[in-house]
Image (spheres, rainbow, N blue to C red):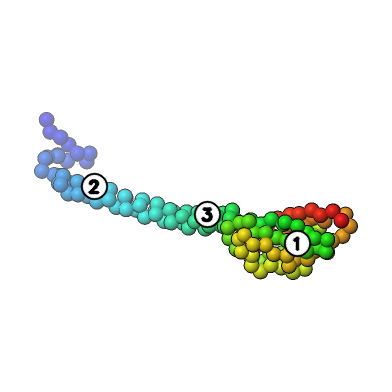
Amino acid sequence: MELYKFGGERMNNKNKAISPVIAVILLVGVAIGAAALAYSWYMGIQKGTQEVGGAAAGRTALASSASMTILDVNSTGYVTIYNNGGVNLTSISCTNNNNACSGTISNLAPGSKNSTINCSLGSGVNTIKCTSAEGAVATYQKLV
């Protein structure tokens, strides 16, 4: 029984495409190349994710450690602010019923208080809201 190729030629065992050793070497090379390509693609995605996640984690940590409380608003309108957080608070400003108060606090260390901001008090309910550059917010209501 003779074997024939598709084109009708007679096929014998002497016609081989490549040796088995070279076939294995080529197969291993293709597998290593595909693995290297997949690794570089994954590391590119991972690096971008780590940079974005790291920045967000830093902002979250700062916002969670920034905290202040309005201890009192005296009868002349001076606001006493206490930093009960773990970081320095900067650029603290206040509003009274959405109207800007006079003065700002440039830096307030943790555990300290300051009374340099003055809000003009009107008759009725005064809602004083103070914010810092770090994201700390405090509100206080005073009835006059």
Q: Amino acid at mark 1?
A: Val
Q: Is residue 98 visible?
A: no
Residue furthest to the right: 123
Q: Which mark is residue 79?
A: 1
Asked where in the image residue 106 lies, by quadrant, the reply is bottom right
Q: Could you tell me residue 42's position as x and y percent?
A: 40, 52
Q: Looking at the image, which is closer to me, 54 or 32?
A: 54
Asked where in the image residue 43 lies, by quadrant, the reply is bottom left
Quadrant containing the C terminus in the rendered view: bottom right
- Cα–Cα gap, marks 3 and 1: 32 Å
Quadrant containing the N terminus in the rendered view: top left
Q: Which residue is mark 2?
A: 27
Q: Looking at the image, which is closer to me, 49 or 42?
A: 49
From the viewer's perspective, is residue 25 above or below residue 117? above
Task: Using residue 117 as the reference point, say whether residue 29 is left or right of it.
Answer: left
- Pointer 2 local density, CA inside 10 Å: few below 14, some 14–19, many at least 20: few
Q: Amino acid at mark 3?
A: Ala
From the viewer's perspective, is residue 35 above or below residue 96? above
Q: Amino acid at mark 2?
A: Leu
